[in-house]
Amino acid sequence: MRPGPLDRLRDRLDRAGARLTALGGWRRRGALVLAGAGATLALPPVGVWPALFPAFWVLLRVLDGADAHAGGGRRAAFGAGWWFAFGYFTVGWYWIANALLVFSDRLWWMVPFAAVGLPAAMAVYYGLAALGARTLAAGLPRALALAAAFAAADWLRGQLLTGFPWNVWGYAWAESAWLSQGAALVGVFGLGLLALVSAALAAAASYGGTARRALALLAAAALIPAAVAGYGAARLDGAPAMLEPADGPGLRVVQAGIPQREKWPRRYARRNFDRHLELSLVERPAWVETVIWPETAAAFFIEETAPARAAIAAVLPPDGLLLTGAPRRTADPPSLRNALVAIDPTGAVRATYDKHHLVPFGEYVPLKRFLPFQKVVEGATDYAPGPGPRTLTLDGLPPVSPLICYETIFPAGVVARDGPRPGWLLNLTNDAWYGRTAGPYQHLQHARLRAVEQGLPLVRAANTGISAAFDGWGREIARLPLGASGRFDMRLPPALAGPPPYARLGDAPFALLLAAVALAAGTAHRRCSKRDGMRPFVEGDS
């Protein structure tokens, strides 16, 4: 019988897979690094989510060759996951080095640690994941196990050693309005697991077996994103039209566009402050009551500077507020905080919020007594963390949960567990460190997914961009582009009538999905063992 198109495609993939499986030395490592780098095409700002399919197929095929690799199967399996993740992180996080080059005369020596050291350290999670997946039979069992192990590695990376869940696999679907709605159900970690399982099923279809089995696996691989997209389309179709409510609080978001090198020097302090004042007042509609400035827009201790607060009071609406980022000092205990400060039209401070999830090495140096350098952010004194997530109640506004910069990347730390549910999220940030790179676009999508997960509108003020606002479905209301100086005015939309499942259940749905995929992998492995007389991997195999 003449082979059909699918048979011919599988035959070509089998031959290509066999060549990948047989690779050794630098060719093997190079293929893995290139595959990991290719997977970053799924991330913002490119957002081509099908890029996961060929990347995962390459990883799976190279992992299959671990047992025949010189030096032992365990070492080679760990290396497969490590080199793949190293390529993914090195390309996906290249912008971190830009933050150090802003002050290259002082921090140039840290560039290799940021550009290579951080990806190398984080890749360990995925090396261990591949090592675990290698214990299952090649094909569908190993593919599913690898997807589950990579998703578990994502979650652990977001929790351990203060956590760094930047570019976890769920952001591969973040650029799609429909696919990203799945975060309302299972959060970004669950979204990543679904994306990985889809890629795993497609990769498993290229292995031996009947054409019917291959078609079934491909259909299942396509069904997962189709089902999530269908849910997302229905969810958005049921959402109210994107019309600003006439009675919603009026907000102005200011983006001054100040280069990082000019943010802290005293010779620029008055100019920078005046620019924020001017953008707060120019052509402002009468319905705007609250003005929002970015993280450390007031690059001085504004609580201690009465003339500056008086100047702010002069440009505020009669019943309005300024919400600005600023450093602040506390006396008991003595400390420096990265804070949000609310100032009223009399110049009085109405409320403050202190950032609680600080950036290691950026805002403080871990184990400082043993390390001979200062933090990256301006100043010799480390910032101290605040007490944790808070909901602020301010006159004329719904209760708000503030998030300063880095805090938007942690799904579980967005809203305080005790107290009233906020009506919106406010993200103050300064992405000027990252220049015109992928970093600000990735950070923006992290913030947008927090709005989807919580069902709350999110307003984002960034020093050099990207400032934006989203409703509780993650739909964009307004935006200022990267590098621009300007402002936008908006009415704050209401929160969703009821919190989405993720906002109520947290990562519990992800844990259930993870257990289900792990169970499916184990079941497939037992069937393969029974059918082919295979035995599970045991200690001592190589």
Image (cartoon, grey):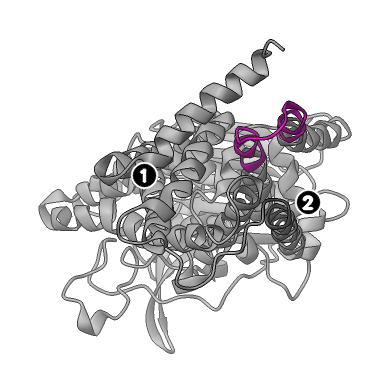
Residue 285 can be seen in this image = no
Q: Estimate the x, y position of residue 82 in percent, counting from the top left.
A: 39, 55
- Tell me the SS state at disc 2: helix
Bounds of the magenta segment? 200-217
Q: Amino acid at mark 2?
A: Leu
Q: Quadrant of the N terminus?
A: top right
Q: Residue at x 46, y 28 (%)?
A: 16
Q: Which of the two residues, 493 or 498, is positioned nearer the viewer here?
A: 498
Front-most of residues 101 and 355? 101
The residue at 80%/63% (across/down) is 504
**Residue 85 part of the magenta-drawn span:** no
Q: Residues within 10 Å of mark 2 (few under 14, many from 20)?
A: many
Q: Tag on residue 87?
A: 1
Q: Are marks 2 and 1 in contact (CB under 8 Å)?
A: no
Residue at the spot of label 2? 185
Per the model, the C-alpha gap separating discs 2 and 1 is 30 Å
Q: Please state, as top left, top right, bottom left or bottom right, where the C terminus lies in the image.
A: bottom left
- Which structural element holds mark 1? helix
Look at the picture and state if 438 lies above or below 157: above
